[in-house]
Amino acid sequence: MGVDAPLRDARFLVLPLPYEKTTSYKKGTERGPEKFIEGSLGVELWDEELGMQTYQAGIHTLPILTSPEPADKFFPRLQAEVERLARLKDKTLFCVGGEHSLSQATIPAFAKFHPGLSVLHFDAHADLRPEYEGSPHNHACALYPASRFCRIVQIGIRSIGEEEAHIVDAGRVKTIPLRRPPDLPSLIREVLRSLGKTVYLSIDLDGFDPAVIPGVGTPQPGGFSWFEGIEIFRQVIAKKTVVGIDIMELCPLQDTVHSELAAAKLAYRLMGYLRAKDSKLF
């Protein structure tokens, strides 16, 4: 991001993953990490909500990891790299995509080190298809593999395919559809009850209303406002142990830069919440 610390001194790591193979609506998520980093240059280092300069805890941007090889070759390599980074003590990894199928490699890496890991899946789409368009590694299948071994709590969901309708509230999956403006306190209580103690945040930016972040690969009407979304994340970080985060599906638009700025500010705010918890501020 805008201010880079040495790896050894960094509390937060950012791994850019400009991978795009299966997007089925708008193309351009491969440019998401590059534009996310550009957007971070417009984020004030002083966090006005938290009253701190979060970057002073150390943010290190890792080399871009991508490959022309297909997912069945690239994902094992990505998982191995994420496992290496997840072993580093006192650091939180932010994986920035790229299409959401990348979570098929990032979530198992954390599950390996955190038995009982649960996933808060923030998205407009359920992403629980076993396969889509002939591939199990499609972005529409992003959370299906993790649902076989992790507790998944989905919020913001307002698009479900017929072939995944029987999965969205079965087995390890709890889906909280978004059909109308949410009763936020009740929603947060339900989310906290449903998650385990250790949590991975998988954030597809289309979980927000398109008025907040229009530059996404598969936009849907409705969604969370900025303040609703960050309040959910604040409460989860305060009450649970968040060990890893991915932010996916940034698809920069030609005529505006506010999507990438919002995505970067979201990451910085989440870092601030984690640092505030480190400091026992909440």
Image (cartoon, helix red, strand yellow):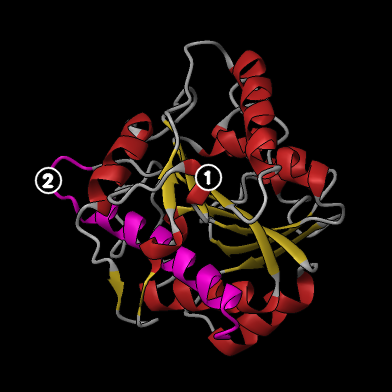
Read off the residue under disc 1: 8
Task: Tell me the kind of residue under disc 2.
Answer: Asp
Residue drawn at (63%, 56%), measured in percent from left and top? Answer: 90
Task: Tell me the kind of residue under disc 1.
Answer: Arg
Q: Position of residue 204 (x, y in %)?
A: 49, 51
Crowd tier of the residue under label 2, counting other residues whose Cα lies within 10 Å: few below 14, some 14–19, many 20 or above: few
Q: Residue furthest left?
A: 255
Q: Position of residue 68 (x, y in %)?
A: 47, 11
Q: Tell me, for residue 255, which label it has, or none.
A: 2
Residue drawn at (39%, 48%), measured in percent from left and top? Answer: 5
| Residue 125 position (above or below residue 138) | below
Q: Secondary structure at mark 2?
A: loop
Residue drawn at (71%, 51%), measured in percent from left and top? Answer: 165
Instruction: Tell whether position 280 is magenta.
Output: yes
- Where on the picture, by quarter, is residue 266? bottom left
Which mark is nearer the camera, 1 or 2? 1
Q: Which residues are magenta?
A: 253-282
